Image: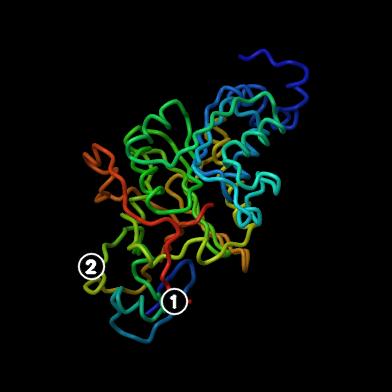
Amino acid sequence: MKDFSDEELERYSRHILLADVGIEGQDKICAAKVLVIGAGGLGSPIAYYLAAAGVGTIGIVDGDVVDLSNLQRQIIHTNAEIGTPKVESAKRKMLAINPGVTVNTYKTMLEAANILDIIEPYDFIIDGTDNFAAKFLINDACVLANKAYSHGGILRFAGQTMSIRPRESACYACVFDSPPPAGIVPTCSSAGILGAVAGMLGTIQAAEALKFITGVGEPLYDTLLSFDAKKMDFRKTRLRKNPRCRVCSGAGITKLEDYEQPVCDLKRPE
Amino acid sequence: MNLVINGDQKSFTEEKISITDLLKIEKVEYQDMVSVQLNEEFLRSPDYPGTFLKEGDIVNFLYFMGGGQ
């Protein structure tokens, strides 16, 4: 086990006090490597909480720079950082809250050609992306590389998430098969998102990562958690691995391909 | 006929309801936006018109959510 300093014992004392976590659980957290894909509405609270929790190595992937329209929900960035790469802005805040973690930044967009190399060193992957091409690619890569991961999606006042243990629990493609036709499904940039909803879902995903690392509780395997913040309705839908899933059933996929979909495209009449 | 749709008990007067009918009745505007689960099994959209519901079936419409940034 890691030799915790007095400063670390105090920093993590509220975790260590949890009977289910304890010093052993905090040791696992400090040794864990988690990759956060997207430093936006979901990625902001995820990155903050993972850093605060002491996750030893946190990777963060995003090819964008901070934009004024991000700041209504992407709370890891600030006004002064408009125009700064999001991964740099996020890393600064993560190290400010906890200088004891290592943050690896990837200022790039994920594609079939680079995703396997990027996810390889990590124990758990978190999808905080804003488009279906990326969400399906992450699913395919995690199934192919056998990496546990958390899927997350938000829209307007709603959110949904599931955790995936490839080939053991239902994957994203078991549920949704393949990306919907471009232009039909609304996304945040076109349909809007209540900022706090991103925070709600992102913190659930961060909690799922910490559960996975520590082995505490039951991750959202074979379960789609959906909520509607308008009525604060939360619902769990029981899932089963789809025997016809084109990604994780039988031989499944053997190589990655990029999905074609313009980011945040929408021609849907309101 | 009584069905459970997204967790809610609902009664229908129609005697024969296909998944396609149900999508219309439930005013699901864009079929490409939902994944349909019948008694925990996922259906493929070409099977919607020929899949008929029976008393007590549990149907879930799971919506695509693509946002995150």
Pick the front one: A236 or B58: A236
**Residue where numbered disc 1 is placed:** A269
- B44 relative to A78 in the view: left or right: left
Q: Position of residue A254 (x, y in %)?
A: 23, 37
Amino acid type at image mark 2: Asp
Are the residues under marks 1 and 2 on the same chain?
A: no
Give the residue number, with chain letter if any, for mark 2.
B47
Verify CB contact (< 8 Å) between mark 1 and mark 2.
no
Say which quarter of the image contains residue A265. Answer: bottom left
Against A50, residue A205 (above or below) is: below
Where residue A245 appears, as percent x and y from the top left, is 27, 49
Q: Residue at horizontal 62%, vertical 68%?
A: A231
Q: Position of residue B4 (x, y in %)?
A: 43, 70
Neighbours of disc 2 within 10 Å: few (<14), some (14-19), many (20+)? few
Residue A75: which disc? none
Look at 43% across and 42% down and name the residue there: A109
Dot 1 lies on which element?
loop
Q: Amino acid at mark 1?
A: Pro
Cα separation between marks 1 and 2: 27 Å
Return the residue nearer the eye: A227 or B53. A227
| Local SS, label 2 | helix
- Of residues A134 and A68, which is closer to you in this image? A68
Nearer the viewer's eye, disc 1 or disc 2?
A: 1
Write the residue at 46% across / 38% down.
Answer: A108
